[in-house]
């Protein structure tokens, strides 16, 4: 059933426009990507406020709060609006245009907004760096530190018991409770939640309920979806609803909880559902409330996504649903459709200089139906593998063994290939040495360049590694890499893929790495955001990035700066490296064990797409190589690779790229023909 028709049937009550200072008794508010609208269920939505997106709406006795990209918005009467952001930490972006730099402050993205059910003056919101709470209706916010940095806190709640307490969820360390009144420390209260090898599955949302004398918390877990309930006095979570069979590799997510008259409403990918929880009894069968297909006229009229709905009837909230981007068709980026559906391989540049090697590769691609080549154009050493035309590249860059693009690109285009230029960004030995190490990452004294090295465990001697990094904060580094991208687009490439778009992580001496171009309160996230913002403004083609598999799996940038939630705003596609060999070998390694690659890619692709709010193409790198870890030694072969691509296709099916550093893909013929024996017959995949 279509969303418009359903809501018309549900909302048969008079809805009035909002005269100044006279909120009506019956009305509906829509939080959208363009702002706040009122709607009567049958006419066109009426605009109330349009300065930024609105992702959540909270009604309190003294007005309304709105969660937006610019902070917390407040209105007492839906006629006047003001931001209440005092106390929030700012994030600094560096803007670079026409050779000039400037700076702008933005708030770190807020992910949740809740009110104390006992005292509506108490509010809580969460962000990447921790939790903020207010005891005066949002006039001033106080910061409560996170338990670890570079992790996105998705959900939080606040309540009085009678002490003021906050509960929040870490992406993988579980749920934590803090007594604000007594200035207590964070207490882990995760017992009973679903967990796996490094901790717990993400808790996406909370609802705090007063059940008689007891405070109870209802929570939803994402990805391995479930509903849990916990009595605060026992601090033990009890699972009460498991909607999918994750043991049979089913995927879904739960988010956007709302409790009304003992019934819990929540989002899953196929619509809003209702689960009776109170009064105490075995929960009845979950029911579908309505299917929200935003292919309908409502979103088309607004030409934007709808993210939240507040329905008030007779002055009382009847429905208050958020996270409705899960049903929208207006999330996608400009080049989404162009980048989607690309299935291919990575190639070192020397393949394109050899007719015999390319003939072999093209034969494999024709037989397997692959249509995409990602090829090194600036490699892991910073060497350009093409002949540049841009004067800046001729001045700074070093070209060696270049591919004859004027010949190679037309030949590939004739064969129907989609061409991706791989550019290694911040790991760059050429730019590292340029102009007396001007742009290199430095040691702590900023007088000498930092080079990552390792210590031999036996001899204790220094073994220098090949870790030559340039400063991600430096706008001249951005300019150089974007110039490379534009030169390659001019010569015929379809897409730019930025790799090593992160901070250095390796080396015994990593603690000495210092970034001399860091300025004005910037951090690792804002450095990568600033670079990609500059790239997005100056590259008229799809932009993709490569990230670690863990950064696609969790809502976390850890210490690399690779955070999908923030970087999604500037890119069109992302390639997480979900290599089974690189995860802990026990990770998802339950029976039948041969299905482990299938699980990692099926769950991983969905998780990254969900974390991006369905806005970018998720095109994983598929492991097409073997290393000496226990699982690979036992299971690696064509069946292993087949399960990886089947997992991707059975998930979101946006495409994939095979990775083999040496370009050895002969075994793909066996993968696609099914000519192998370690494909499980226990499941019909």
Image (cartoon, rainbow, N blue to C red):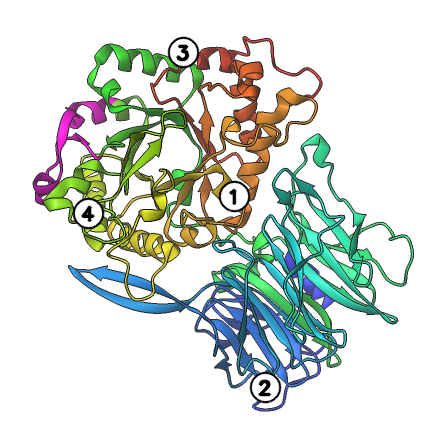
- Numbered tag placed on residue 448 in the rendering: 4
The Cα atoms of the two marked residues, 4 and 1, are separated by 39 Å
Q: Is residue 430 left or right of residue 158?
A: left
Lower position in the chain sequence, tag 4 or tag 2? 2
Q: Is residue 425 left or right of residue 27?
A: left
List x then y, in percent, for residue 317. 72, 74
Q: Is residue 682 left or right of residue 112?
A: right
Select label 3 or label 4 by which is in front.
Answer: 4
Cβ–Cβ below 8 Å for labels 3 and 4?
no
Q: Tell me the magenta residue range.
A: 382-411
Cβ–Cβ below 8 Å for labels 4 and 1?
no
Lower position in the chain sequence, tag 3 or tag 4? 4
- Numbered tag placed on residue 608 in the rendering: 1
| Element class at badge 1 | helix
Q: Is residue 13 magenta?
A: no
Q: In the current view of this chain or complex, which residue is farthest to the front?
A: 459
Q: Mark 4, residues whose alpha carbon is within 10 Å: few (<14), some, or many (≥20)?
A: some
């Amino acid at each position: 059933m279509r969303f418009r028709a359903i809501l018309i049937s549900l909302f048969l009550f008079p809805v009035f426009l909002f005269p100044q200072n006279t909120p009506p008794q019956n009305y509906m508010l829509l939080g959208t990507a363009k702002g706040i609208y009122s709607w009567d269920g049958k006419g066109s939505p009426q605009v109330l406020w349009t300065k930024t997106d609105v992702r959540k709406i909270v009604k309190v006795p003294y007005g309304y709060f709105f969660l937006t990209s610019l902070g917390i918005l407040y209105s007492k009467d839906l006629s006047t609006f003001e931001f209440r952001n005092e106390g929030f930490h700012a994030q600094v972006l560096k803007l670079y245009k026409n050779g000039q730099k400037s700076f702008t402050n933005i708030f770190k993205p807020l992910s949740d907004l809740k009110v104390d059910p006992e005292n509506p003056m108490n509010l809580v919101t969460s962000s990447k760096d921790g939790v903020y709470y207010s005891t005066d209706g949002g006039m001033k916010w106080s910061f409560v530190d996170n338990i670890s940095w570079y992790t996105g806190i998705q959900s939080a709640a606040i309540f009085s018991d009678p002490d003021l307490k906050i509960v929040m969820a870490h992406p993988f360390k579980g749920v934590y409770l803090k007594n604000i009144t007594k200035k207590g420390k964070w207490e882990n209260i995760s017992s009973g939640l679903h967990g796996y090898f490094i901790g717990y599955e993400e808790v996406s949302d909370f609802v705090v309920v007063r059940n008689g004398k007891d405070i109870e918390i209802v929570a939803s877990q994402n990805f391995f979806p479930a509903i849990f309930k916990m009595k605060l006095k026992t601090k033990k979570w009890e699972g009460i609803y498991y909607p999918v069979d994750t043991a049979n590799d089913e995927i879904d997510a739960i988010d956007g909880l709302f409790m009304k008259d003992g019934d819990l409403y929540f989002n899953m990918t196929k619509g809003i559902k209702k689960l009776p929880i109170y009064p105490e009894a075995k929960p009845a069968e979950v029911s579908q409330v309505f299917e929200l297909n935003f292919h309908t006229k409502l979103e088309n009229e607004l030409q934007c996504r709808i993210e939240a709905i507040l329905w008030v009837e007779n002055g009382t909230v009847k429905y208050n649903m958020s996270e409705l981007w899960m049903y929208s068709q207006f999330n996608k980026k400009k080049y989404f459709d162009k980048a989607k559906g690309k299935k291919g391989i990575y190639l070192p540049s020397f393949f394109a200089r050899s007719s015999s090697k390319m003939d072999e590769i093209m034969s494999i691609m024709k037989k397997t139906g692959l249509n995409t080549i990602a090829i090194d154009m600036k490699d892991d050493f910073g060497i350009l593998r093409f002949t540049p035309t841009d004067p800046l590249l001729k001045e700074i860059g070093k070209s060696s063994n270049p591919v004859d693009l004027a010949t190679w690109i037309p030949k590939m285009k004739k064969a129907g290939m989609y061409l991706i230029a791989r550019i290694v960004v911040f790991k760059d030995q050429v730019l590292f040495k340029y102009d007396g190490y001007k742009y290199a990452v430095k040691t702590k004294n900023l007088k000498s360049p930092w080079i990552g090295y390792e210590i031999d465990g036996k001899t204790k001697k220094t073994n220098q590694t090949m870790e030559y990094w340039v400063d991600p904060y430096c706008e001249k580094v951005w300019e150089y890499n974007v110039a490379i991208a534009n030169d390659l687009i001019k010569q015929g490439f379809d897409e730019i893929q930025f790799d090593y778009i992160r901070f250095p992580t390796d080396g015994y001496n990593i603690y000495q790495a210092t970034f001399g171009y860091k300025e004005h309160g910037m951090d690792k996230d804002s450095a990568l955001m600033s670079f990609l913002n500059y790239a997005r403004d100056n590259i008229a083609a799809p932009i993709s990035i490569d990230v670690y598999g863990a950064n696609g799996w969790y809502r976390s940038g850890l210490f690399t700066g690779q955070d999908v939630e923030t970087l999604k705003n500037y890119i069109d596609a992302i390639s997480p490296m979900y290599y089974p060999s690189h995860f802990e070998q026990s990770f998802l390694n339950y029976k039948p064990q041969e299905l482990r690659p299938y699980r990692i890619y099926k769950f991983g692709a969905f998780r990254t797409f969900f974390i991006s709010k369905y806005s970018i193409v998720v095109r994983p790198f598929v492991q097409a190589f073997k290393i000496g870890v226990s699982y690979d030694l036992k299971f690696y072969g064509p069946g292993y690779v087949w399960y990886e691509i089947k997992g991707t296709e059975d998930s979101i099916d946006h495409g994939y790229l095979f990775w083999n550093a040496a370009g050895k893909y002969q075994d793909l013929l066996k993968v696609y023909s099914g000519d192998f024996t370690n494909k499980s017959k226990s499941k019909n995949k």
